[in-house]
Image: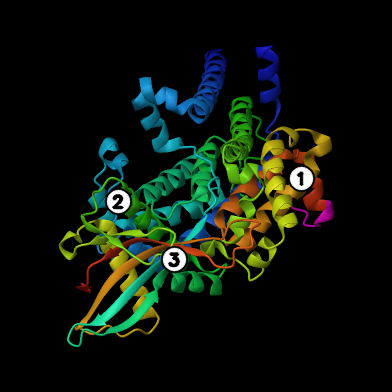
């Protein structure tokens, strides 16, 4: 008899938690902003285990990033190379497709670093020294210059590590005298259904020269 | 009313056959995922990583020492693989499933820089699997001929949750997409096909050159994500949506090089079929004779 009561109790509890879970989940999906205002703790705790944000390509990329590592010889002051490291990574990802876990993971990591830098730029926290005028044929004529002593954002350090990794993987010899600077461009995809023949670039930021760590 | 619901849910484990297949495939898939990551684990999880990753706030709240876990990341990965093996063979049943869920959760929190929708789906499916009875077939010690009404009820609710989860994922994506002008004006797939990080084939940019194809693919995506959550439950339209879903995810798999997500979205499709349909398909169509009909 007791076993029957216990089983019946478990059934009601199971159904109760099932309904509670789904009511909460649907509320979190459709009215998270409202809940966030009066019960931020509930949202935070729910998100730790059950975070639901489904937005695959909701905001399609209208641009491709181009991250150039410009290398120069410190002694001669000559630029020795200018390499788009993200392009090299994407080429590797394509070549190894299906078995490209490593390239894909690096792609995710770098995407996050660039997002963090963009966010820092928007908050003006990235330690940019000045605004620089650049070529008039680019979409945006303003870019930001980063001073070497502000090279302390983790995202920049990770970009440096990434760049070094990719350059060495592609046979670029980095000597103790080699200095580098990073230059990020946003390469806009030409608009849909237009006859524009060339893509437009927007210069986003440029760092000062420094040695690899 | 409530009694009717209860008596229906008690009656049997309606998806026991597919749940067992699902468990085995999910375990193999998660083993493959961690296997592929092995050359990269130091970079992702170790204190000695060449990259610097910030601590996830969950660790502080849960009172877990983030740096201790990072220091012993190999132990965590070994435990994850060990529990996945148990899960694969149905040893430890719900307990091993819970442990797989916990180890996966910790690994995801340890480094969330490389996670995508597929990882999120894997976590949620594993959570529901803790409650699902997927141990009637393909186990070292199967739970055959053991009628347990409470277990049936909980398992059926867990299965329903996985199916709901899939539908909600599609529907929420649809709702987010229709608030974006590129999806509304039909050009979104043009930009998707021109995104260099997802150029899965050399044909992507060629496809994007045809306005007609771009419009068709964009609106097909929207229609699929809107209608699937409703019409997959209708027997007459179910097969059409299963085929559309398979094509949709295979398209993303090959053209956009997003792999794990597609498999985790396709796996729950089998739950929309009954035990007898699955058994007939496996035994008669595939001639594998895994199940006693």
Q: Is residue A151 left or right of residue B187?
A: left
Query: Height in image: B127 above or below A24?
Result: below
The CA span between labels 3 and 2 is 23 Å
A76 part of magenta stretch: no
Q: Residues within 10 Å of mark 1 (few under 14, many from 20)?
A: many
The circle drawn on residue A137 is 3
Work out whether residue B3 can be spotted. yes
- State yes or no: discs 3 and 2 in contact (Cβ < 8 Å): no
The residue range painted magenta reads: B284-292
Is B73 left, or right, of A86 in this rendering? left
The residue sitting at 63% across, 71% down in the picture is B202
Q: Position of residue A114 (x, y in %)?
A: 36, 57
- In the rendered image, the quadrant that contains the C terminus of chain B is top right
Drawn side of residue B142 relative to residue A102, left or right? right
Q: Position of residue A202 (x, y in %)?
A: 41, 60
Q: Is residue B290 magenta?
A: yes
Mark 3, secondary structure of its residue:
loop
Query: Label 2 is found on which chain of the structure?
Result: A
């Amino acid at each position: 008899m007791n076993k029957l009561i216990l089983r019946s109790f478990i059934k009601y509890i199971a159904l109760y938690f099932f309904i509670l879970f789904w009511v909460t989940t649907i509320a979190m999906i459709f009215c998270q902003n409202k809940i966030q205002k009066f019960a931020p703790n509930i949202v935070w705790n729910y998100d730790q285990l059950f975070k639901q944000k489904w937005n695959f390509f909701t905001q399609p990329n209208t641009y491709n990033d181009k991250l150039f590592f410009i290398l120069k010889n410190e002694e001669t002051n000559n630029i020795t190379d200018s390499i788009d490291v993200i392009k090299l990574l994407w080429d590797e990802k394509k070549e190894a497709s299906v078995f490209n876990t490593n390239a894909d993971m690096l792609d995710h990591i770098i995407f996050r670093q660039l997002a963090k830098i963009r966010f820092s730029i928007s908050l003006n926290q990235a330690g940019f020294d000045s605004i620089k005028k650049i070529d008039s044929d680019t979409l945006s004529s303003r870019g930001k210059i980063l001073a070497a002593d502000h090279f302390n954002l983790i995202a920049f350090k990770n970009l440096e590590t990434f760049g070094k990794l990719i350059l060495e993987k592609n046979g670029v010899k980095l000597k103790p005298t080699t200095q580098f600077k990073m230059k990020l461009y946003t390469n806009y995809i030409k608009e849909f259904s237009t006859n524009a023949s060339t893509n437009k670039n927007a210069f986003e930021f440029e760092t000062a020269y420094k040695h690899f760590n | 009313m409530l009694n009717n619901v209860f008596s229906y849910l008690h009656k049997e484990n309606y998806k026991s056959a597919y749940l067992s297949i699902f468990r085995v495939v999910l375990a193999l898939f998660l083993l493959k995922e961690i296997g592929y990551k092995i050359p990269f684990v130091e970079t992702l999880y170790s204190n000695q990583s060449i990259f610097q990753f910030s601590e996830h706030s969950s660790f502080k709240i849960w009172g877990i020492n983030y740096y201790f876990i990072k220091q012993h990341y190999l132990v965590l990965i070994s435990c994850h693989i060990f529990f996945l093996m148990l899960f694969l063979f149905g040893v430890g049943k719900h307990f091993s499933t819970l442990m797989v869920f916990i180890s996966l959760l910790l690994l995801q929190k340890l480094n969330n820089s490389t996670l995508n929708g597929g990882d999120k789906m894997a976590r949620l499916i594993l959570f529901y699997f803790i409650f699902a009875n997927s141990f009637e077939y393909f186990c070292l010690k199967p739970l055959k001929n053991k009628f347990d009404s409470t277990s049936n009820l909980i398992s059926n609710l867990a299965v329903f949750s996985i199916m709901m989860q899939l539908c909600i994922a599609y529907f929420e994506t649809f709702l987010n997409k229709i608030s974006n002008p590129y999806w509304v004006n039909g050009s979104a797939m043009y930009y998707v096909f021109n995104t260099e990080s997802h150029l899965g084939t050399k044909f992507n940019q060629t496809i994007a050159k045809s306005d007609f194809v771009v419009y068709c693919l964009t609106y097909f995506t929207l229609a699929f994500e809107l209608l699937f959550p409703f019409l997959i439950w209708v027997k007459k339209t179910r097969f059409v949506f299963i085929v559309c879903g398979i094509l949709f995810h295979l398209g993303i798999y090959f053209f956009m090089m997003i792999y794990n997500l597609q498999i985790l979205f396709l796996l729950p499709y089998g739950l929309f079929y009954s035990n007898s349909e699955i058994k007939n398909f496996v035994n008669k169509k595939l001639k594998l004779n895994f199940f006693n009909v």
